[in-house]
Image: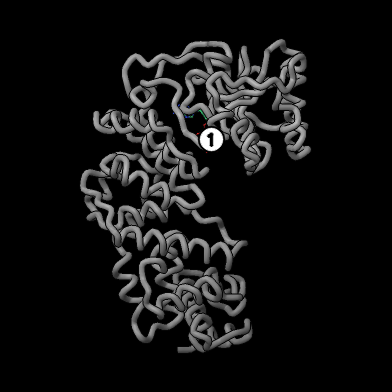
Amino acid sequence: MKKYLEKLPKEIQDLIHLASDIAAKNKMPAYLVGGFVRDLILGAKNLDLDIVVEGDGIRFAEHFAASLGVKLIRHRRFGTATIVIKSNLKIDIASARKEFYPQPACLPEVAKGRLKDDLSRRDFTINAMAISITPRDFGRFIDSFGGKGDLRNKRIRILHDLSFIDDPTRILRAIRFEKRYNFRIDSDTLGFLKKAVKLKILESVQPQRLRDELILILKEERPIKQIRRIHQLLGFNFIALELSVSKRTYKLLRAIEKQIKWFRQEYPQRRPLDTWLIYFMGLIENLAINHVQAICKRFVFRKGEEKRILAHKKIGSKLIHRLSRAKVNPSIIFSLLEPLSYEIIILIKAKSENRNIQRRIKDFFEIYNGMRPYISGDDLSGLGIAPGPYYQKIFSEVLNAKLNGRIRTKQEELALIKKLVRT
Ligand code: ATP
């Protein structure tokens, strides 16, 4: 595997060699594992280094972080740690472990183990390969389950017959990897998957774990393929019994995809979108608000996520109605859209084909978003206006005049204020 490792960017190679030194110094055999190895062989970019050590993973990670002079996030319960090098480059370090499933679909019991045990607990053969980075056998490839052959044959295969029963979230994971890489779920694996679905095994999984896997799916580059496959293999009862996904839903999802692409192309410098949230809102578009509230509660979304999901449900239609009118002043467009998150605005743009709405949202992003008056509180007190609630009124009058093109410069703002004060 050395030749694969040598093709990596220098920065990653240096990190691997540093891990190798730490493995030698601390007498802890270390391995690259999981998605990193899979993507290395596929030639796909992956900047999440996954390292398993035979020994104390947290102690290994402490040495690693100290050598780099960076912070470490410890997850003591799992014997794992994460080192974030920069926003798009991180290293997960874990102690090799064995897992037992005392009951299907529950979290496993965990004990210290060897690499072999750690690979045996994994989801699919393509995620169960390892490369030693311990100096004495640096580059040795460990592939006990035939993962490399499955990569060649574009196949998603579980490691044992009860895999989906032990952990039903693997059903969603199988679909995610199948569609991401354009692979096929192997026919035996597909049989076990269907059996597990028939047993309604997903119902016994903790909802937050389903949520996490669903979010990962919706974060994929083109999640509609995955959504279709979920539709075909298991349906959407795991989100809500009332959820029905129709042709109209797919039309909306396609429109969302188009609008996300538009936004990224036009405004690459803006805050990146939480695209998964837009797809999620699109997916549950047909549900009544009480059902949406129930999903938010069951899935325990973060406050900010729940707020956006419910805000759209509450005001989405009214907003579309108001934005589609023949005449709408820029100050009104601003007052309607400025308080909303970009995710809701993109969803509204995707939902409506109305030309006025399309143009107004574009104008919002291009001209009005973030607009403020030039004048400040100091300017107002300089004009002899005593601080108080009146300031807010003046600011908003000035801003509206500016949005509606009645004034442009700071001088014009000051002139308007003087006029307002006089009246
Ligand atoms: P991605 O490219 O999406 O990050 P990944 O393979 O790195 O893919 P993670 O969800 O980060 O995916 O998981 C890391 C590794 O942990 C996987 O490659 C797999 O070996 C293992 N893993 C994750 N979830 C499970 C699971 N539910 N059951 C068994 N193994 C799992």
State whether residue 61 appears in this view: no
| Crowding near the residue tagged with mark 1, few <14, some 14–19, many ≥20 C-alpha atoms within 10 Å | few
Residue 52, x across and y down, in percent: 61, 21
Quarter placement of the C terminus: bottom left
Judging depth in this view, the residue of 233 and 132 nearest the camera is 233
In the picture shown, does residue 119 fall above or below 89? above
Judging depth in this view, the residue of 230 and 355 nearest the camera is 230
Q: How many marks?
A: 1
Residue at image location 49% in from the left, 34% down from the top = 155
Q: Mark 1: which secondary structure?
A: loop
Asked which colour scheme the image uses, the reply is one colour
Q: Quadrant of residue 64?
A: top right
Q: Quadrant of residue 320?
A: bottom left
In the picture shown, does residue 349 fall above or below 215? below
Residue at image location 44% in from the left, 48% down from the top = 218
Residue 96, x across and y down, in percent: 56, 16
Residue 182, x across and y down, in percent: 50, 44
Amino acid carrying label 1: it is: Asn
In the picture shown, does residue 319 fall above or below 201? below
| Mark 1, residue position | 153
State whether residue 384 appears in this view: yes
Judging depth in this view, the residue of 74 and 380 nearest the camera is 74
Quarter placement of the N terminus: top right
Residue 4, x across and y down, in percent: 72, 33
Horizontally, residue 155 falls left or right of residue 46, namely left
In the picture shown, does residue 245 fall above or below 151? below
